[in-house]
Amino acid sequence: MAEMIQDDPRWRTWWSHAAPRDLTIEAAYGPRVERSTFTTREGRFWATFRRNSSRFRGLNKNDLAYLAAIDLQSFFAEASTSLSLPAPPPVPLPSHATPPPERRDAARTRLEELRRRHGRRP
């Protein structure tokens, strides 16, 4: 995705409104509380995001690619707000990205799979 964003003139135009010349986004996923921090120093802007990883359980690579793009869009939007920039362009979705099913749907699908595999109803 980084290459698609860097090669897109809409993104260059969006960042041209920023005073810092460089943007660094760091994302960490784990069991910790979610938070975002922003630092500007010496012409550079750092955006650090901590997100809870529990929402990734049971998802396939297509679901994860979709969530990565959605998270990246959210990160850019938060950075944009912090710098008083216009809204960023949309983050391109990878071709294999699909929205994950809602947790209820995922649980129901898993239960049906287990029932088929084990041939019984709980």
Image: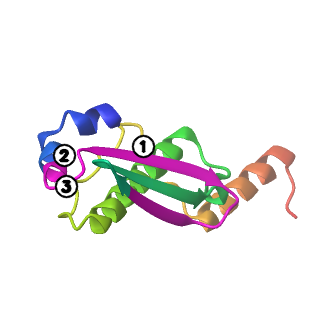
The percent position of residue 87, horizontal first and vertical second, equals: 21, 63
Badge 3, how many Cα within 10 Å: few under 14, some, many 20+? some
Q: Secondary structure at mark 1?
A: loop
The residue at 88%/64% (across/down) is: 122
Q: As shown in the figure, which amino acid type bears the numbered disc 3?
A: Ala
The residue at 57%/59% (across/down) is: 51
Q: Which residue is mark 2?
A: 11
In the image, which is nearer the foreground, mark 2 or mark 1?
Answer: 2
Q: Quadrant of the N terminus?
A: top left
Relative side of 43 to 33, left or right = left
* Res 35 seen here: yes
Q: Secondary structure at mark 2?
A: helix
Is 102 in front, or is 84? 84
- Work out whether 102 lies above or below 27: below
Is 30 in front, or is 122? 30
Work out how far the residue at label 2 is from the one at label 1, CA to CA, in angstroms.
Answer: 21 Å
Relative side of 49 to 54, left or right = left
Q: As shown in the figure, which amino acid type bears the numbered disc 2?
A: Trp
Its colouring scheme is rainbow
Q: Which residues are magenta?
A: 14-39
Is 40 in front, or is 26? 40
The percent position of residue 94, horizontal first and vertical second, equals: 36, 39
Task: Give the numbered dot on residue 97.
Answer: 1
Q: Secondary structure at mark 3?
A: loop
The residue at 25%/53% (across/down) is: 90
Q: Is residue 23 magenta?
A: yes
Q: As shown in the figure, which amino acid type bears the numbered disc 1?
A: Ala
Q: Which residue is mark 3?
A: 18
* Res 98 seen here: no
Work out how far the residue at label 3 is from the one at label 1, CA to CA, in angstroms.
Answer: 30 Å
